[in-house]
Image (spheres, helix red, strand yellow):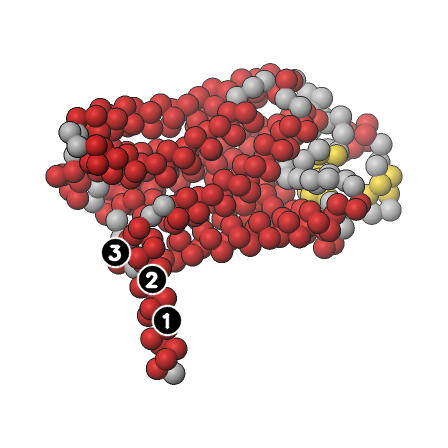
Amino acid sequence: MWHFGKFYTMEESNKTGMTYFIIEGISDVPELQLPIFLLVLLIYLFILGGNMTIFLLICMDRHLHTPMYFFLANLSILDVSCSTITLHKPLITFLTGNKLVSFVGCVMQMFFFLSFTCNELLILTAMGYDRYVAICHPLHYQVIMSHKVCCGLAGVCWVLGFLDIMPCAWKVSSISCYTSLEVNHFFCDFVPIMKLSCSDTFALQLYVIIEGVILASFVPFVLTFISYVFIIKSILRIRSSNGRWKAFYTCSSHLTIIVLLYGTLSYQYFRPVEYITLGSYKLSSLFNTTCVPILNPLIYSLKNKDVHSALKRKFKKMSRLIKRK
């Protein structure tokens, strides 16, 4: 393996300790590099523009200072952060031609990606609880979902997300034996790294199943599921069909994101590493890191009258300021 003019064999690399990986990227076909770069850049700009528009709109418009939009603002920040940490490498590789990433940088990228994903699942759980309170306890909604409670819930979600992934990242950083330096992925993720390891990773995979899959994914899913069991029961008690439709409509955006995110994550991580093919895994990762962050602002803006009204108010305010000038 060439590295800045010096040749290392795999044996020498393992003996001296891992210092870098080579990220293969989305495709190694030369003719596809420019189209892929332009597509990834366009997707990233759309993710950045859409989610930051939602975030700034929620911050600036007092009509959107409600618990649901507070959690949506957190979700927008997580989408931007997750996309930035994963899509920046394909963009930088095209511009510089440098596919190398340091071992520490690779572990840090994996840590932040998994932490942001875990945070997103927890924030979606908090949003499910918010919908439960809004539909099942509407008279006490303002008291139960106070600003202090919302900030506390969001803070717990962020802290737990990082704490949950920290032991996993530490265990991965202690692996020193790898069969290859080339990572068949477009960023450093857990499964491609484990595929390269020539050490015994059974204990680590068992830990990931218990800590990552069960605690970080299954528990939030169960809590969200319980919230929707009570929500459905309350909706079925509503006598008018129009009332039932309105109640369900308020949850439809959240449910759509839940199905998309849990669907892609279950396909990616809820299987033993040995049975995962990196080709299909790369495709599901692309969907998870591009389509889901794009759909979040689209789903919540296109189907939401409050967001439409807030956008109209801001456009009218901007037009009045332009006319005065």
Q: Which residue is mark 3?
A: 63
Q: Residue furthest front?
A: 241
Going by the image, does 279 lie left or right of 136?
A: right
Mark 2 lies on a secondary structure that is: helix
Going by the image, does 20 lie left or right of 275?
A: right
Category of crowding for the residue at label 2, using alpha-carbon neighbours closer than 10 angstroms: few (below 14), some (14–19), many (at least 20): few
Image height check: is 163 above or below 236?
Answer: below
* Residue 100: quarter of image: top right
Identify the residue at horizontal 33%, vertical 25% (top origin).
225
Mark 3 lies on a secondary structure that is: helix
Amino acid type, callout 2:
Lys
Identify the residue at horizontal 84%, vertical 37% (top origin).
1
Q: Position of residue 143 (x, y in %)?
A: 15, 42
Q: Which residue is mark 2?
A: 312
Instruction: State whether residue 59 appears in this view.
Output: no
Q: Position of residue 314 (x, y in %)?
A: 34, 65
Amino acid type, callout 3:
His
Category of crowding for the residue at label 1, using alpha-carbon neighbours closer than 10 angstroms: few (below 14), some (14–19), many (at least 20): few
- For the residues carrying marks 3 and 1, which lies nearer the camera in this image? 1
Q: Which mark is residue 318?
A: 1
